[in-house]
Amino acid sequence: TQLLEQSPQFLSIQEGENLTVYCNSSSVFSSLQWYRQEPGEGPVLLVTVVTGGEVKKLKRLTFQFGDARKDSSLHITAAQPGDTGLYLCAGTHGSSNTGKLIFGQGTTLQVKP
Amino acid sequence: DTAVSQTPKYLVTQMGNDKSIKCEQNLGHDTMYWYKQDSKKFLKIMFSYNNKELIINETVPNRFSPKSPDKAHLNLHINSLELGDSAVYFCASSHRGAGTRGYTFGSGTRLTVV
């Protein structure tokens, strides 16, 4: 079973602080995706990383894929209340072309003004 | 211009009833999925169809039956609903593989069985 462990599960911070969310596995993934989900809505794709060691930036969000493609991190600089939501990492397994995504348990982020 | 639309948004029903959830996508994707999100927000795949062909069928009770009349539609029928079926069900679509382009999700159907 390929599992993705996300940490922390909950994070409550003040506006302006920095934070990092981690996504770890014992399995190698061919790609790793990050989604954000707001209440009452479906997850929305933020980024996909496919190459070991890859770093992608999306404004104040920085995503990194581990060299061995078993882990990933999401770093948010100067968090804002609009960043509040559920952050999900999800991976695809290289041996399958079914498109099956395996999700982590999610990190609930609350940014207080 | 909704990309993935699913109906209804909310569904409250009694145990033992049969209900259906409908999903449609206008993105030209060839693969569609049903995911279940439990009370702890964990998303787990149930089914996937590629061009109307079932390609993923995870360990789901056979009370759940997906149906794909064409590649733009994927419906989910649930027979003999149980309390444990209460959850949010998400439809999603992608190009086959989804490795780099990801999924597009619908906004979910919150099913409550009483």
Image: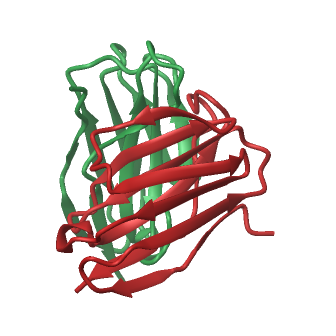
Chain colours: A green, B red
Please provide percent x and percent y for residue A82.
48, 74
What residue sits 28% from the left and 86% below the top?
B14
Q: Is residue B110 visible?
A: yes
Judge whether B51 appears above or below A34 on screen: above
Using the rendered view, name the quadrant where residue A69 is placed.
top left
Quarter placement of the C terminus of chain A: bottom left
What residue sits 42% from the left and 83% below the top?
B11
Please provide percent x and percent y for residue A33.
47, 38
Q: How many marks?
A: 0
Using the rendered view, name the quadrant where residue A110 is placed.
bottom left
What residue sits 36% from the left and 87% below the top?
B12
Please provide percent x and percent y for residue A98.
52, 27
What residue sits 63% from the left and 49% below the top?
B68
Q: Nearer the viewer, residue A76 or A100?
A: A100
Quarter placement of the N terminus of chain A: top left
Judge whether B52 appears above or below A10 on screen: above
Left-right relation of A106 to A61 = left
Please provide percent x and percent y for residue A91.
40, 32
Q: Nearer the viewer, residue B22 or A57?
A: B22
Q: Is residue B108 visible?
A: no
Q: Nearer the viewer, residue B8 or A99?
A: B8
Q: Nearer the viewer, residue A29 or B49?
A: B49
